[in-house]
Amino acid sequence: MIIRRYIKSDIDEITKLARNLHVNYTFDLNEFSSCLVCTENDCIIGFITYFILYEKAEIIDIYVKMEYRKKKIGTKLIKKVIDECYKKDCENITLEVDINNQAALDFYYSFDFKIVARRQHYYNNGMDDAYVMEKKLR
Ligand SMILES: CC(C)(COP(=O)(O)OP(=O)(O)OC[C@H]1O[C@@H](n2cnc3c(N)ncnc32)[C@H](O)[C@@H]1OP(=O)(O)O)[C@@H](O)C(=O)NCCC(=O)NCCS
């Protein structure tokens, strides 16, 4: 299992996985954002997208293939991002998560993310709310 920064030829596979999260997903990173992938036998089994904008960092998406969940792959991906954010002296990392996504909430709690706000009608055509979570780094 290898964790590495994405390369251009990964984009189709990342997009396929990400469409499980957002039906119309398109891979669209800018100069501040990036993506790490986890591969096994040259297949992508998980990824994380995020941006670091000076002192602010945000996790955009994290996804691990169903059959590889609960094997600490998400942990390895998010830890790399957290380390990078510490190195770049970010103040905090934020993210948004569906309030009904208990697995993701428990995952983020385990890295000391805390709920700081609730956005109404954020997901699922306005059916579901999101929590904004924050991990303070300093
Ligand atoms: C959230 C997600 C990335 C976690 O990845 P993962 O590789 O399965 O997580 P890990 O094995 O590293 O789990 C680390 C910790 O998170 C928590 N956790 C992870 N999955 C959990 C679950 N299904 N239920 C409860 N807690 C969970 C646990 O505390 C776990 O530690 P433990 O295994 O010692 O109990 C994965 O479930 C996923 O891809 N979900 C679908 C996509 C998604 O919802 N992304 C987040 C959108 S905001």
Image (cartoon, rainbow, N blue to C red):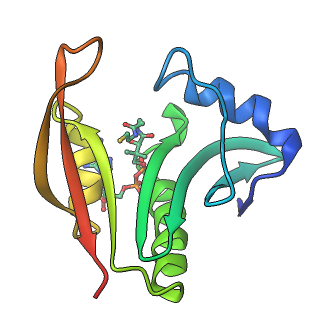
Foreground residue, 67 or 36? Answer: 36
Q: Which residue shows up at 67% across the image and 50% down it?
A: 30
Q: Position of residue 27 (x, y in %)?
A: 67, 34
Q: Which residue shows up at 28% across the image and 88% down it?
A: 138
Q: How many marks?
A: 0
Q: In the rendered image, which quarter is residue 12 located in?
A: top right
Foreground residue, 18 or 66? Answer: 18
Q: With respect to residue 17, does 72 lie above or below? A: below
Q: With respect to residue 138, does 136 lie above or below? A: above
Q: Which residue shows up at 22% across the image and 47% down it?
A: 105
Relative side of 23 to 44, left or right: left
Q: Position of residue 80 (x, y in %)?
A: 55, 72
Q: Position of residue 128 (x, y in %)?
A: 18, 21
- The image quadrant where one finds the N terminus is bottom right
Q: With respect to residue 71, does 80 lie above or below? A: below
Q: Which residue shows up at 49% across the image and 32% down it?
A: 66
